[in-house]
Amino acid sequence: MEAYDFFEITSREAFEQAALEVFRAQFRTVPVYGEFCRHLGRTPGEVTQAEDIPFLPIEFFKSHKVLRRGATETVVFQSSGTTDSGFSRHFVPDLSLYASSYTRGFEYFFGPVSDWCILALLPSYQERPGSSLIYMVEGLIRAGAREGSGFLNGDADGIAARIREADRAHDRVLLIGVSFALLDLAESHPMELSGTTVMETGGMKGRRKELIRQELHGRLCRGLGLERVHSEYGMTELLSQAYSSGRGVFQCPPWMQVRIRDTEDPLSPVTPGKTGGINVIDLANWHSCSFIATQDLGRHLPDDQGFEVLGRFDHSDIRGCNLLAIGR
């Protein structure tokens, strides 16, 4: 399998086969991942089904350069962590691969990007360099090339006026924003939006008290005249995104999967409906690691109806992952 081939995946069987092929390649070519797998005794000879593929704890993106041997990064995306916890860094040698993933992923769920006027309310991300979310949104705005699209900056009155104008002028408007900024907008400038889809990217980023998703979405619906709020699930360490069209239930594009691990035994999966740690397979991470154990808690819904994100591990909860850590 070559890069970009995974965009043609159309079945679960094809995904499982592709995941095994990518695992074998990354075991050989991504030094830190190969060392991690050998530490667990999970080599290609022992891994014969996708369920046995090890997931690299996401903390390794803070302490190691997770990159295929011989590749040279074009850009380094950096997380919005704290100085105490450190910053994740994702070394990306092929930006066109990222562009293909986020564009195809968006269009898989929402149709042609050219149909959308995209407004971005992402102040916390714009204030720092190296944001993969900013890069994605900028790319979608350029690809759509719709009049009125762009980032929302300036005073709150001007931002609200621009949103109302776009809502009147276009049939399909996407307002994508960080949670605290959307909540500030809904409370200070309530409005009745008709043709606008609001998508939150999560996180109060220390600006406001954290809310459970149900309460956040309820406040946004009341303040902005919405029936539901969409969500995006992505992170610095990934090149693909999952999306929710409401109720906090996420779906992945065909080249991405979420699996739930036991919080006490990170090498074991859990049954649908049970809460556990979120593992992500992102085949777009061709040049780094496609198999990542995140610090998020979630659960699968029965009958492949999607997954929910329920929160984050605290420091005591992540001991299972820490036991798998290896030296630099």
Image (cartoon, grey):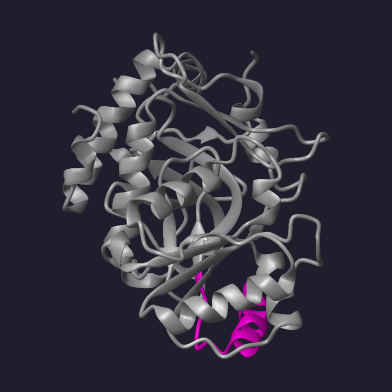
Q: Find residue 186 and report its horizontal and vertical position in percent.
A: 68, 80
**Going by the image, does 4 lie left or right of 189?**
left
Q: Which residue lies furthest to the top in this view?
A: 70
Quadrant containing the C terminus in the rendered view: top right
How many numbered badges does the structure rendering display?
Answer: 0
Tell which of 325 and 267 is nearer to you.
325
Q: Which residue is at 77% across, 44% downward? A: 315
**Going by the image, does 278 lie left or right of 85?**
left
Magenta stretch containing residue 225, yes or no? yes
Q: In which quarter of the image is residue 47?
A: top left
Tell which of 152 and 77 is nearer to you.
152
Say above or below: 199 vs 1: below
Magenta stretch containing residue 3, yes or no? no
Tell which of 320 and 245 is nearer to you.
245
**Going by the image, does 236 lie left or right of 290?**
right
Q: Is residue 266 visible?
A: no
Say above or below: 71 vs 247: above
Q: Find residue 312 and report its horizontal and vertical position in percent.
A: 67, 55
Q: Find residue 229 and report its horizontal and vertical position in percent.
A: 52, 77
Q: Give the range drawn in magenta.
A: 212-230
Q: Which residue is at 45% across, 21% downward? A: 41
Say above or below: 148 vs 26: below
Q: Is residue 209 visible?
A: yes
Say above or below: 113 vs 18: below
Quadrant containing the N terminus in the rendered view: top left
Q: Find residue 68 and report its horizontal and vertical position in percent.
A: 41, 17
Q: Is the magenta stretch mostly helix, strand or loop?
A: helix
Q: Which residue is at 46% across, 84% downward? A: 168
